[in-house]
Amino acid sequence: MTATAPALEFSTTLSSSPVPAERRAEVLAAPGFGTTFTDHMITATWTPDAGWHDASLRPYAALSLDPATATLHYAQSIFEGLKAYRHADGSVWTFRPEANAARFQRSAVRMALPELPAAAFVDSLDLLVRTDVEWVPSGGEASLYLRPFMFASEVFLGVRPAKQVTYALIASPAGAYFASGVKPVNIWLSSEYTRAAPGGTGAAKCAGNYAASLIAQQEAIANGCDQVCFLDANESKWVEELGGMNLFFVRADGSVTTPQLTGTILEGITRDTVLTLAADRQMKVEERPVSIDEWRDGVGSGEITEVFACGTAAVITPLGRLAWDGGELTMGDEPGPVTQELRAALLDIQYGRADDQHGWMHRVV
Ligand SMILES: *Cc1c(COP(=O)(O)O)cnc(C)c1O
């Protein structure tokens, strides 16, 4: 794409049977997560000859896929996740959508998919949110969850990058992740499974990473935990991240540490934001390798006072307990003060209650 490439034009076909306002109000009163979708969606197609084309906003509907559609066989598929927030004055905003656009491009490159121009990505979010703005919940920590994704839609069983690719965007109202107050989550340390290996796809937000993590997640649940923590694939020594959230350690000296990006860790936008918010508060921030021994010993000695996970869906989540085959470690039954401060700081920006000093908010309506 050259700088002068025209932005993607979206045609618009509005739904002739939108969800009745009454039913929508019911959904918005208790949205849950990822089960109900708005009245519209966006799709666009890419081919090597035509580039991105046929971009449209249209009624939400099932996709009809030929059984030989490549993504169903070889998982050439990536996605993003971000939220639209309604502020007290009724305006609606997204948070750092350009960062999601850039990561979507990096994921595409890794999976041999075409890059969607960042402007087209952000335009698609704006268009869908504006069209379905009545679906953006207000109050609490509710939001409209936005799910852009891209997949190999060519009908072909040969193994090579697809010559037809579909971009799509859907939206789903989301309730507060912690409906009854923030509660620490319990983590299972996987010793059998890894999430990502050097040279692999760990830094790409691709569907296959999630498929590969599910068995470990199942093991976590079977061991009475909520989420799984993965170690590095080479030495089983270095802490990487959870299945869909990055990790932070708070120390008694007030510093905040997160595992450095090695190519096997997903570069979370919340992670990057937390690093900035902590630095803004004069906390010492470090990105460096953190070993599982440092975690266990640090909590034992009191040097590590809080551990939290972060990502778009759950914002910032305190960890309560770390369990593994043969032992466990308790971090706390209540969210720690630094976890709470950073969590509140981030939510205050996202919901328009605090100054947006870094220009992170993007107004949609
Ligand atoms: C999406 C994701 C995250 C969190 O990224 P955010 O941009 O903060 O939502 C962390 N780890 C993995 C593996 C992810 O897929």
Image (spheres, helix red, strand yellow):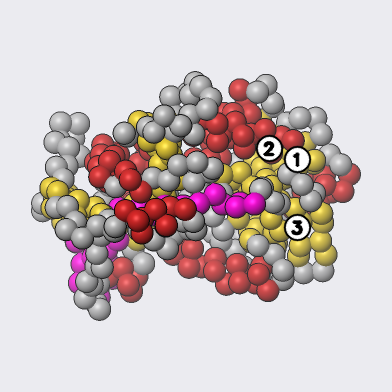
Q: What is the quadrant of residue 76 in the picture?
A: bottom left
Q: Are marks 1 and 3 in contact (CB under 8 Å)?
A: no
Nearest the camera: 42 or 140?
140
Q: Are marks 2 and 1 in contact (CB under 8 Å)?
A: yes
Secondary structure category for the residue under label 3: strand
**Residue 216 in picture, x, y percent from top left:** 61, 69
* Residue 155 belongs to magenta span: yes
What residue sits 14% from the left and 52% below the top?
13
Label number found at residue 291: none
Q: What is the quadrant of residue 19 in the picture?
A: bottom left
**Which residue is disc 3 drawn over?**
322
Nearest the camera: 128 or 142?
142
302 to the left or right of 130: right
Cβ of mark 3 under 8 A from ligand 1: no
> What secondary structure is the stretch in magenta mostly built from?
loop
What residue sits 69% from the left and 38% below the top?
339
Secondary structure category for the residue under label 2: helix
Q: Quadrant of the C terminus?
A: top left
Residue type indicated by callout 2: Gln
Cβ of mark 2 under 8 A from ligand 1: no
Q: Is residue 327 visible?
A: yes
Q: Which residue occupies the extreme right position in the image?
A: 301
* Comes first in the chain, label 1 or label 3: 3
Q: Nearer the viewer, mark 2 or mark 3?
A: 2
Magenta residue span: 151-180
4 to the left or right of 71: left
| Mark 3 nearby-residue class (10 Å; few <14, some 14–19, many ≥20) | many
